[in-house]
Image (cartoon, rainbow, N blue to C red):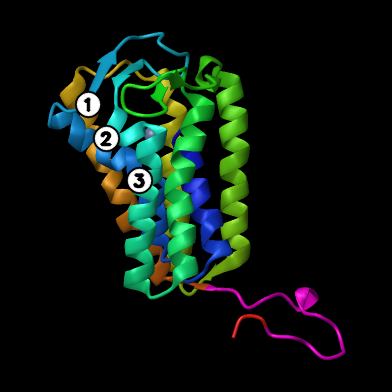
Amino acid sequence: MFVGHLAVALAAKRVEPRAPLGTLVGAAFAFDLIWPVLLLAGIEMVRIDPGNTAFTPLAFDDYPWSHSLSMAFVWAVAVGRVAAAVLKHARAGLIIGLTVLSHWVLDFLMHRPDLPLWPGGPEVGLGLWNSIPLTLVVEGVFFAAGVAIYLRATRARDRVGTWAFWTLVLLTTAIWISGPLSPPPPGVTAIAVVGLALWLFPMWAVWIERHREHRPPAMGSRPRGGPTVRLDI
Ligand SMILES: [Zn+2]
């Protein structure tokens, strides 16, 4: 999964505006940010195996530290707690932690059974990647929903706020759709180096957020007449 992770970050921004978008994007991609580092260190293994699934030529032979369910919980709690402490906001930390965890759930939908429940444990995955059309439809709808939610929750403060956002959406869509059409990568080092480029996206999100602001609640969503109770003191 690729743009689907970005969709979660965009939607989470609506759920908790106090969670910074750059942190949410980093959280949503967290395991794929760690993975190339572990590949380069020789700790995790990937193999180029065209046809492994229809959507990707990669065989994820061994990635227990970045992609097992048990480690997903560990990373989610650790990142969530640090974020809550730094932001001094428990709910923002919770949403960031859940965004980290969402990565595993979404990968579980796409991957063939290669995601370990714990290091050395049974491997699971529903294998949506076995069908390119199904992957494009499910992940595409998911991404479109994330983009729509984010656009309803925020608005551009200037032109940069508009085009910085849309170039991110178009670039990630292009990378995602061209994946199955591209030749397999030349080697594992190339996979890791390209994977490291993913670190650009959280920084890109920081830049986007500097040029956008949260929309005030729409008139229609305010309670009409009568006493109102403010819950968000
Ligand atoms: Zn992943």
Secondary structure of the residue carrying tag 1 is: loop
Res 197 visible = yes
Image spot of residue 179 (x, y percent): 40, 25
Q: Residue at x 42, y 20 (%)?
A: 123
Region in magenta = 214-230
The residue carrying mark 3 is 74
Q: Is mark 2 within 8 Å of ligand 1?
A: yes
- Tell me if residue 96 is in the magenta stretch: no
The residue located at (51%, 62%) in the rendering is 13
Residue 65: mark in rendering: none
For the residue pair 214 and 231, the one nearer the viewer reads as: 231
Tell me where residue 110 appears, x and y as whole percent: 50, 26
> Residue placed at 57% from the left, 63% from the top?
14
Mark 2 Cα shell of 10 Å, populated few (<14), some (14-19), many (≥20) = many
Question: What count of labels does the image hold?
Answer: 3
Q: Where residue 35 is drawn, which disc sits there?
A: 2
Residue beneath label 1, please?
44
Q: Using the image as rendered, state which of residue 165 and residue 71 is in the foreground.
A: 71
